[in-house]
Image (tube, helix red, strand yellow):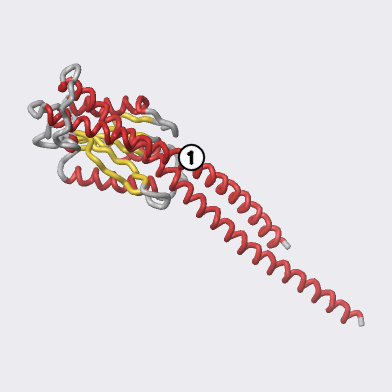
Amino acid sequence: MAGMREIRGQIRAIQNTAKITKAMELVAASKMRKAQERVLAARPYAEAIRRVIGNIMQAHPEYRHPYLVERTEVKRRGLVLVATDRGLCGALNVNAFRTALRFIREGNEQGIETVGYAIGRRGAMFLRKVVKEVAAVKEPVPDAVEVQELAGIVRSAAQAFLNGELDEVWLLYSEFVNTMTQRPQLVRLLPCPEVAEPTHPGYWDYLYEPEAAEVLDGLLNRYLEALVYHGVIENKASEYSARMVAMKNATDNANKLVRELRISYNKARQAAITKELSEIVAGAEAAK
């Protein structure tokens, strides 16, 4: 009977856990849909500012902004790592951290020091273990994060690049592909020559007030903020998608384990009943 009581306790505990994981799955699914909407809403802005910058640079090819100048030798580079504040999201953070660790080790082999910039509590914890310097941290990161909340860490990295303290700045985040797939994306923020070519060549005859060079200075800062913001909301969508799948798997595993324990309980109960019947029969035979 002690074995049966123990099995009943395990069943109750696992059922309570399954209720929690099911609730977390539903919450993550709801937040994932909202995060997807924010990702889709931000994409047109990122494409538009990229196109405008390309057009301005075509209008003034003689002007080279410091953000676009390649360094002859790279000795130090910054890594802006976007991760989650909490766990229970499958292998999302692990995959991003593996990519970051490979990036840092490749730099060390080439004599390049990496300076960390973390967005998210888990990313900050990771960077403090693998790099000598973590220059800036943004945590926690709310679900409905705004560009202004990320401007500080972007400006810190950009100013270090302008001052010559960093020769490159990279961004690492988890891209949301679909509900089942999220993949780490490593993109270079600075210098950013990829915006030098216009999206629509020949369509750049705008009138700028003030001069196009001054407009470009402001737009490039907005462009960097838009890239980081887009990476953060992509990571948010990936986080809730991965958490939803992880909690669904946990709930399914819990239900499967409950079924197996119920079978074991029924077998133990049947064995106890059979034993009692055998004892009754044996007693009756002995009484004769």
The quadrant the C terminus occupies is bottom right
> Which image quarter holds the N terminus?
bottom right
Determine the residue positioned at 24% across, 26% down.
221
In this view, the residue in front, 195 or 10, is 195
Frontmost residue, 185 versus 273: 185
Tell me which residue sits at (41%, 52%) in the image. 180
Left or right position of 116 against 193? right
Mark 1 residue crowding within 10 angstroms, few (<14) / some (14–19) / many (20+): some
Is 161 situated left or right of 30 in this image? left
The answer to which of 218 and 163 lies nearer the viewer is: 218
SS under mark 1: helix
Residue at the farthest top position: 210
Residue 121: image location, x then y, percent: 40, 35
Q: Amino acid at mark 1?
A: Lys
Image location of residue 110, percent across then percent down:
15, 44
Say if 90 sits above or below 125 in the image: below
Where is 247 relative to 226, above or below?
A: below
The picture quadrant where one finds residue 234 is top left
Residue that numbered label 1 is attached to = 31
Residue drawn at the location 22% of the way across and 34% of the way down: 51
- Residue at 12 percent across and 34 percent down: it is 70
Q: Report whether 48 appears left or right of 73.
A: right
Indicate the position of residue 68 as horizontal and vertical percent values. Answer: 15, 31
* Direction from residue 235 to residue 200 in the image, left or right: left
**Residue 4 percent coordinates (x, y):** 70, 62
Q: Quadrant of residue 145?
A: top left
Residue 176 in view, yes or no: yes
